[in-house]
Amino acid sequence: GWSSNNKYALFGAMRDIAQLVSYEIPMGLAIVGVVLMAGSLSLTDIINAQNVPFILAQPLGFLIFFTASLAEINRTPFDLLEADSEIVAGYNIEYSGMKFAMLYLSEYCEALAMAAITAILFLGGWRGPSLGLPTGSLIAGFLPVVWLILKIFAVFFVIIWIRSTIPRLRIDQVLGFAWKF
């Protein structure tokens, strides 16, 4: 924002820094709750520790993590910098064509990655009901992958659903929400 010699980019960078500081602390604390329950930082150990998915054991931690992750990937209602409905819509003034398409694709990849992290930390990862299949069968070998993909797409669906239903917040609302609640 500073290097572009543009006051609007500088304001956007300052808003981004304020938003970053506000949501990173609650997100870190929500992850610490998961790590304390699992007793490890290893994602495999976190999944194996979830006899009961952590979303049931820590519903508030899940809501805090999910809300902060929406702010992390700049999705609605926290897309303050790339506000598509405003006159100057963030990166839309800098990129067009394939550069814009790649940037837009990277945002969806970020949302997919955050859905995967959410599925691993709070939904039990690849663990799910075995459906009574024999242990050595080929289908039983693919079942954990299917469970993980279903959980990732369920979280991704919720991310898309929230984007289409909740209006964007103002910067003062985001900061107040992150620091007070």
Image (tube, rainbow, N blue to C red):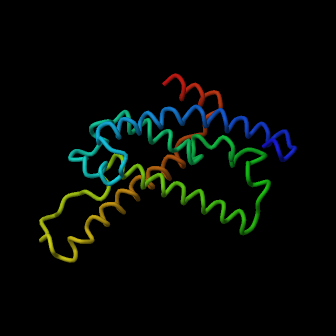
Q: Residue furthest top?
A: 180
Q: Is residue 85 left or right of residue 53?
A: right
Q: Quadrant of residue 60?
A: top left
Q: Residue at x 12, y 71 (%)?
A: 134
Q: Residue at x 48, y 58 (%)?
A: 112
Q: Residue at x 62, y 44 (%)?
A: 79
Residue 135 is situated, as x and y percent measured from the top left of the image, at 14, 70
Residue 109 is situated, as x and y percent measured from the top left of the image, at 54, 60
Q: Is residue 52 left or right of residue 27?
A: left
Exactly how many numbered labels are in the figure? 0
Q: Which residue is more in the foreground, 89 or 2?
A: 2
Depicted 46 relative to depicted 26: above or below: below
Q: Residue furthest right?
A: 5
Depicted 63 relative to depicted 131: above or below: above
Q: Residue at x 42, y 55 (%)?
A: 116
Q: Is residue 28 left or right of residue 129?
A: right
Q: Is residue 9 left or right of residue 178?
A: right
Residue 40 is situated, as x and y percent measured from the top left of the image, at 33, 44
Residue 6 is situated, as x and y percent measured from the top left of the image, at 86, 43
Q: Which residue is more in the foreground, 144 or 92?
A: 144
Quadrant assignment for the N terminus: top right
